[in-house]
Amino acid sequence: MSGQAYDSNNIFGKILRGEIPCHRVYEDADTLAFMDVMPQSPGHLLVIPKTPSRNVLDADPAVLSKLMPIVQKLAKAAKDAFEADGITITQFNEPAAGQTVFHLHFHIVPRYEGAALKPHSGQMEDNGVLAANAEKIIGELGA
Ligand code: 5GP
């Protein structure tokens, strides 16, 4: 393998093991999705595979093939739940590309015409707001 090895002592590894909390919006046998604590836009969420990998570069294609339909499903749910004009999906690989947490994740970010994004890994959102936003997406998934 050309890149660095996966280190399970990362924040999303801890979330997967239940060692730190998250505002969960979706879970199945292979995938977990939860709110980003420093949202770039209201409703910004993260989708991660349960199988460890640092990023796309070392991910098993079989894991990606299970993950992407969930990314799509949650992008549609977030667009509807937040009445967004569009959705940005981002995914960073290694620090040079902007990655700060080294467990593969996709960002799903609601967008609005003419509205700039807040900074990446910027300001912590209030817990109550994150909880309410998670409920909006959960409600949309159940609709
Ligand atoms: P990256 O730069 O690796 O693509 O993005 C990592 C993301 O994780 C950032 O958007 C950041 O706001 C988010 N993040 C960092 N720490 C935590 C945390 O403890 N919980 C949650 N839910 N998100 C986090």
Image (cartoon, rainbow, N blue to C red):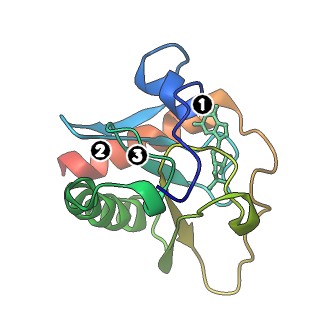
Give me the residue at 32% from left, 67% from top: 76
**Kind of residue sitting beneath label 2:** Gly
Q: Nearer the viewer, residue 49 or 108?
A: 49
Residue behind mark 2: 139
Q: Quadrant of ligand 1?
A: top right
Q: Is residue 133 visible?
A: yes
| Residue 1 x, y percent position in the rendering | 46, 55
Q: Secondary structure at mark 2?
A: helix
Residue behind mark 1: 10
Using the image, determine if residue 68 lies above or below residue 137.
below
Foreground mark, 1 or 2? 1
Foreground mark, 3 or 1? 1
| Residue 107 x, y percent position in the rendering | 52, 59
Residue behind mark 3: 48
**Kind of residue sitting beneath label 3:** Ile
Give me the residue at 51% from left, 39% from top: 6
